[in-house]
Image (cartoon, helix red, strand yellow):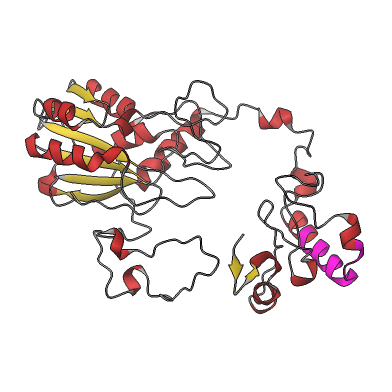
Amino acid sequence: YNKVNGEYSCSNKEQLDVLHRRMGFKGFVQSDWWATHANSIESGLDQEMPGMGSGEGTEGHREYYDADELQDSDPEAVDEAAKRVLAVMYRMNLPETTKCAPPNCKEYFLKEVTTPEHIQLARRAAAQSIVLLKNQNEVLPLSPTFAKSIAIIGAAADAPSYDPNGAGQGQGGDWATGDYYSGGGSGHLAGNVVTPFDGLRAKAKSLNMEVMESLTDDPIVAAQVAKQVDIAIIVAGTTSGESRDRLNLNLDGDVDKLIDAVRKVAKKTIVLVAAPGAVVMPWRNEVDGIAIMFLGGQETGHAWADVLFGEQAPTGRLPIMLPETEADTVWPSDADDVPYTEGLATSYRNPAFKAAF
């Protein structure tokens, strides 16, 4: 969708030539949905999406790769594009392995493919991705030997997944509305989601630990609960959605105030963060433990429990640096012209960048 030096990237011959010629890319180039603004087959765009049959005027867009358009194009460019697409199809053995072709795929789209093995894989992958950011005085792993009671706190601890096709979600939003399990966009995770509350409570109960909860972001109620237990576990989160920027890097629900209220009265405080990317943690020096999971999927709750109770080591590593404040980030822009004056001097490459983690 973006322009590079004033020209849409799907039509940018200089950019596509670098990919095809200089870098030797052997695959084919496909546009994102309705990102094509002209017949660009001679520039190196091999396939337009959503493709034929999407309909003239769909979402205000037309089809640029229909038969009439291609007939007026350079035949060698058309042949080259077709060759690249077919090469990938045969490299992946699609003629022999493809189960169906639209519109005859409803059976496969609706087929139940979940298995116990898939569930265990999802759980293991989520647990192994958790990054332990802080563990002061070895507050983790949790054990009934050192903690007889815990409190699970925060609206994010029991947040539902967002299903754009579901009824009674009560969340508003649209197809790009995200959640704490899979974000938002063309794909959503719905059904059979283990929340952090469910996973942590089940594990603690199995160890005969007392469990209290405050499943809102109300700091007054949370503090009242937190002062009654050995360890307060706050679940905080934010999410993101396709096609739009996040408004800020804060966690949802003004949860910073909740964390501050809890840590002032709790014996020990652990914060679990669900995030799609960078977030700011102004309270990081005031709590005992911090761990982060980047949109862990359907087994999120079990994965948190596996790590917090020591059944899985927190082997994850940060894929990004977390900024100390929003001032340490490059702000997005929707302006027509966005000069990338920072060049490569972002994050750890910038000596002025201050990292929280």
Give left or right: position of 50 versus 261. Answer: right
Seen at 38% across and 35% down, the residue is: 300
Residue 197: x %, y % from top left: 30, 27
Determine if residue 207 is in view: no
Position above or below: 32 against 115: below
Residue 203 placement, left or right of 90: left
Indicate the quadrant containing the C terminus: top left, top right, bottom left or bottom right.
bottom left
Specify the quadrant of the image occupied by residue 151: top left
Which is nearer the eye, 253 or 273? 253
Q: Is residue 151 above or below residue 321?
A: above
Range covered by the magenta-colored residues: 71-85
Point 14% across, 52% down: residue: 285
Instruction: Tell me, yes or no, whether the highlighted magenta stretch contains residue 206.
Output: no
Q: How many marks?
A: 0
In the displayed orientation, state which residue is furthest to the bottom. Answer: 22
Give 76 or 49, whichever is nearer the viewer: 49
Q: Is residue 84 magenta?
A: yes
Instruction: Say left or right for 137 vs 107.
Output: left
The residue lying at 33 percent from left, 55 percent from top is 317
Q: Quarter of the image for the N terminus: give it.
A: bottom right
Image coordinates for residue 254, horizontal then vertical, percent: 27, 40
Closer to us: 312 or 300: 300
**Residue 279 location (% of width, % of height):** 32, 52
Residue 188 shows in the view = yes
Q: Residue at x 43, y 37 (%)?
A: 179
- x and y percentages locating residue 31 in the rendered image: 68, 58
